[in-house]
Image: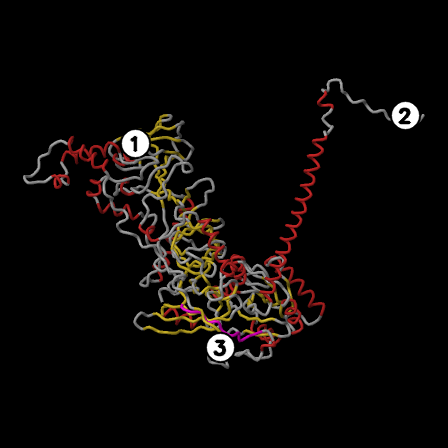
Amino acid sequence: MGGSRAQVNKTHKTRFASKSSRNIHKTSLKDKHQNAKSDRFGKGARAARIQRNNMIRDQKRAAALNEKRALSGSASPPRVIVLFGLSAHVDLNSVERDLLGLLSTKCSNEAFPTVVSSDYKMRATVLKAPHGDLSSCMDMAKVADLVAFVTSASSPCEGGSSDYIDSFGVQCLSVFKAIGLPSTVVLIRDLPSDLKGRNESKKLCNSSLASEFPEQCKFYPADTKDDLHKFLYILKDQRLKPPHWRNQRAYVASQKLEMLDHDSVSGKCTLCITGYIRALNLSVNQLVHVSGAGDYQLSKIDILRDPYALNPRKEHDTMDADDMPDLQVISSLVPDSSKQEPLHVENVPDPLAGEQTWPTEAEMAEAEENLKHKKKRKLPPGTSEYQAAWIVDESDEDDFESNDESEGGMVLDGVEIGVASNDLDEDQGSLDLGESDGETETDSMMLVRWDMTREQIEDDIKRLKDAHAEDEEYPDEVDTPIDVPARKRFAKYRGLKSFRTSSWDPKESLPQEYSRIFAFDNFARTRKHVLAKALERDNESKDETVSPGTYARLYIKEVPQTVASYLCLRAKMMPIISCGLLQHESKMSVLHFSIKKHDSYHEPIKGKEELIFHVGFRQFVARPVFSSDNFNSDKHKMEKFLHAGRFSVASIYAPISFPPLCLVAMKKSGVMGSPVLAAVGSLISVDPDRIILKKIILTGYLQRVSKVKATVRYMFHSPEDVKWFKPVELWTKCGRRGRIKETVGTHGAMKCLFNGVLQQNDTVCMSLFKRAYPKWPEQRFPLSNL
């Protein structure tokens, strides 16, 4: 039975198989030799690949170990711990007092005490963020190694997203996230004394605030010294992660600030900033930026003996800054004039760069040929040929006028719309009105003057809000003026056949400000080269650079005395930040930022309004122009307002900066009001050739319709304007396309032809474009007008 049920497989079909296909699975001796040889090479390549992976792993492990030693070793600078209260009633003084009591038994009278703890083997500087002062909180967060958010478990808050955080805490937290949060912890105060209520309150606080902080953020009770002891014990071995942009530039958070070498004639002085060098090596040949004050050169760097040494074997060498009038100077670095970075801000244009060169032989021959064929004219007796060349004949003027009237002057996708010379002479006042361009005012509507009353300011705010609402309802639509010819009012505009594919020369008709800025042939390549050069500075000789963790004094020269006096007063409340600049970062150019209006700001933000840009450690004043970001085109449409809920691109004249960098835009809330948060974003690129086009739409109404033909009125008010704009394509709001056929009457009516049947209630539109540029700031830095 078993034999009859045995499996019988189907025989292989070889009836139609060729000899080569039957022997394809067989391998010859030659192929076997080649396969063996390739296997031998493959095993060697595999071994090399394993060895290379092991080498990369060892390098990464060594780099991580060196980074950990640099951040937590004796040579690392003190850790900056910023205490931030999530609500106004949180007592930060008691938290600071308890932390300093655990870290050191010595009492310090400094505004920003730096303590040394041999028990925890760490050095720390504790800063208290003032609740309600957004600028100070933001500057402290930029230099913080650890942000400790302190909340109270017993006092509920109003106006916030949680019971433990108020509205200002929510706003600051969103700004910290835009800047880039360093390592964070949450300290919970005022917990109940009984164990059960303590655990329940901690869980409730944790569940309420967990969504506001990163996943790595830990929650610690902080009522007793034992709780803070556990927190500090974990902190001393924790690897803190700063934002990525902060590791690309050396910076100093001041612990002492003073003024030297006053010059009453020039009004300049030398500003001395004493503190620890952080992040990267700082070269004495570098330029430095003092936050809010501007870019300057260094005259000297003094390397001082560390007054807060962590090594107990060097306790006899440590000195207290309060006991010594001057810290002991170990060495001094002086800049090399041949290597020092020059302080170039603006490009100096050559006024003769656009002059005509000497004519070539071909041009001379062509000119002589034209003179031979030129008809004779009646000239005054004694007139030379050179003088005759400057005398214009009446017939030439008549020909010029007739040609200008017949051609119309506008070329679609060609040279920008021009105005004839006779029109310029006839109505110069109207031309000036047209060039001023009422939609893009040179002075912002919200620019508050000193002589304005409260009622006038409120009227300006109301008018701005109405313009913002009108822009959202009827974007880009403008009315053709009746008293000014449209060919003069819109002389700078041109038509485009296609916004995406039509060409626009980025070097055409540039404004005067473009002669003062710098541009790169290849920005990405320059950025890569500059960042590589900054990393190579770590391997330079110690005669020119100061390594991170060194206690040093920077001598910044030619600082205005008024600015230095203000910084000395501000240094008593918070540290003054000074950062090293990369190559080219002092030069002016056109910067583009991805920007989004903040949710807490409800007022409209109009283009070319004055804003304070916080870009990394740097601050400067700018008047941006907003635009959309088109990925499929080299042209971008300008936006009159920064609309909420979406990202736009802000283009400004500002000193060059290399991404990645964060952006926080502030706006002054009045004449003497403090800046308020307006928008956040990040730096995209530096590109003066980015084309931003302002679009306007002229509308007309159908008077008579006959299938695909129609008579349109009220788009223009004179036949000359109709002839001028005849090459531009028309479109309707119902999707029809057309063109101007001819003028009708003397009041600007025109016959038009479309590609489909029209409806009587349709609206005829014409799109015109001109290139828009940001406005040059009146002051480059917030403290420039002191």
Residue 304 visible in the current orientation: yes
Residue 163 visible in the current orientation: no
Q: Which mark is residue 750?
A: 1
Q: CA distance from mark 2 to mark 3?
A: 102 Å
Q: Secondary structure at mark 1?
A: strand
Asked if the residues shown at circle 3 and circle 1 are in contact, with their CB atoms under 8 angstroms apart, the answer is: no
Q: Secondary structure at mark 2?
A: loop
> What segment is highlighted magenta in the picture?
299-309
Type of amino acid at the residue the image marks with label 3? Gln
Residue occupying the far left of the picture: 381
Residue 554 percent coordinates (x, y)? 44, 69
Q: Which mark is residue 328?
A: 3
Q: CA distance from mark 3 to mark 1?
A: 86 Å
Say left or right for 223 vs 592.
right
Above or below residue 389? Residue 569 is: below
* Of pointers 1 and 2, the one earlier in the residue sequence: 2
What residue sits right under mark 2 in the picture?
A: 5
Residue 705 percent coordinates (x, y)? 35, 28
Q: At x 37% / y 30%, what residue is drawn? A: 738
In magenta stretch: residue 62: no
Looking at the rendered image, the disc whose residue lies closer to the viewer, 2 or 3, is: 3
Residue closer to the observer: 585 or 569: 585
Say left or right for 197 vs 129.
right
